[in-house]
Amino acid sequence: MSKKAANDLQDLQHFGEYGGVNPSISDSSTYTFLSAKTMFDTFEGNTEGCYLYSRHSTPSNLYLGEALAALEGTEAANVTASGMGAITAVILQLCNAGDHIVSSRTIYGGTYAFMKNFLKKFNIETSFVDITDMDAVAKAITPKTKMIYCESVSNPLLEVADISALAKISHKNEIPLVVDNTFSPLTIRPASLGATIVIHSLTKFINGTSDCVAGVVCGTTDFCLGLKDVNNGAGMLLGSTLDSQRGASILKNMRTLHIRIQKHSENALFLAEKFEADGLKVIYPGLSSHPGHLKMKDQMIPQYGFGGLISLDVGSLENANALMELMQDNKLGYLAVSLGFYKTLFSAPGSSTSSEIPEEEQKEMGLGDGLIRFSIGLDNDIQRTYEQMKQCMEQLEILGSKTLISQ
């Protein structure tokens, strides 16, 4: 199990048009046919190996989809032009007017806003619950519920979902469990734990170079084909199509994913342990103090570690902003949203990636003003990084403040 995903990716082999070790990129928006009958059959989805129009599919995107299905251990995968393109397509494919969703309350702000605000237009309601409370999840399900939605490791509070337990609830109620696995590729394999559909923002760790926006839906062959149906497929009709050039680029970057994830996790664990020992309030699943630590250990693949995300609470938004600006000035990383870059990225999620969540709800879920989310980079000398970060905190008198001592 521990090596299967990486081995499946390693075993994929596609030759370019002229024997290249990288598959050729199909740089066309439309495709020609020698027979009108073949065009008709292709439009109806009955002709394998033929292409009609790039919004339907392209060779480059199908190669990438094959790799992502291998990564997650699903039958198939559809790539999209963004993570939100994947999320919205899945939700609108599964839900109709009058339906209901049970979702984790700690999710990416864009997903939260789509569920809470946008879906009202279609009379689709969402109940946001503590996803770690199985009783709360079960009680929230109604006859109109069409899906349970969560993140393997939540954004930005790093709550760990018990995917196996959630899958049992979803199967009992005959509804799909949809899991956003953006924070933990390779580390957690939701489909093997019972998830029905797995989503990623490819923008983050899977691509790893912060130069594109993309997403993917991993699931059964039937579901992925349904998303691409020309008559009623949400993926097809919403038009979130990934450019072939970007698809080819992401596929190349996936070949180093196993190495990068190991290093991100190694560096994050080192810093988390150091800063917790210094008295900072640290949120990281690799720490025994984390409420989801044992659950993470139970469902993770150990060789890839606990992930590259750390959240630190430095007491106030003023402290957070000053620290991020100082760290950027000292070349420790970038004050920027997103994650999975070779360099550390940091942001205050309450005023950025989770700003769509109302302030009172942020407080209720424990998302304080002083929280900084760090996507730890691939630093070669992480001890040096720690010492420089600590100097920034000492300069701003953040370390040692009574408000920061872990409870």
Image (cartoon, rainbow, N blue to C red):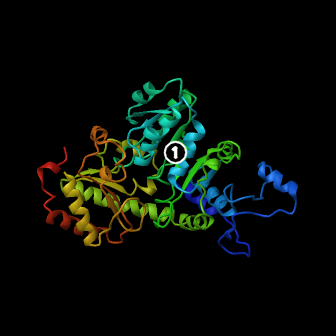
Q: Position of residue 45 (x, y in %)?
A: 76, 49
Up-down relation of residue 196 to residue 214 (above or below): above
Q: Inspect this view and state whether residue 151 appears.
A: no
Query: Residue 344: x, y in percent?
Result: 35, 65
Give the quarter of the image for residue 39: bottom right
The spot of residue 292 in percent (x, y) is 35, 42
Q: Amino acid at mark 1?
A: Pro
Query: From the viewer's perspective, is residue 182 above or below residue 295?
Result: below
Q: Is residue 303 left or right of residue 329?
A: right
Say few, some or many: other residues with alpha carbon within 10 Å of mark 1 (under 14 / 14 to 19 / 20 or more): many
Could one spot residue 303 in this view of the protein?
yes
> Which residue is at 54% across, 51% downward?
85
326 or 184, nearer to the observer: 326
Q: Helix or strand or loop: what does disc 1 sit on?
A: helix
Which quadrant does the C terminus fall into? top left
Task: Please give the name of the residue rendered at 43% of the width and 24% of the height, measured from the top-left corner.
Answer: 139
Q: Taking 15 as reference, is 117 above or below it?
A: above
User: In the rendered view, would you say 395 is above or below 80?
Assistant: below
Q: Quadrant of residue 262?
A: bottom left
Residue beneath disc 1: 190
Q: Residue 35's quadrant in the figure?
A: bottom right
Which residue ends up furthest to the front in the rendered image?
A: 121
Determine whether, in the image, residue 210 is placed left or right of residue 250.
left
Residue at the (53%, 58%) spot, across then down: 214
Q: Position of residue 216 (x, y in %)?
A: 56, 53
Q: Count the labels in the image.
A: 1
**Would you say 271 lies left or right of 303 here?**
left
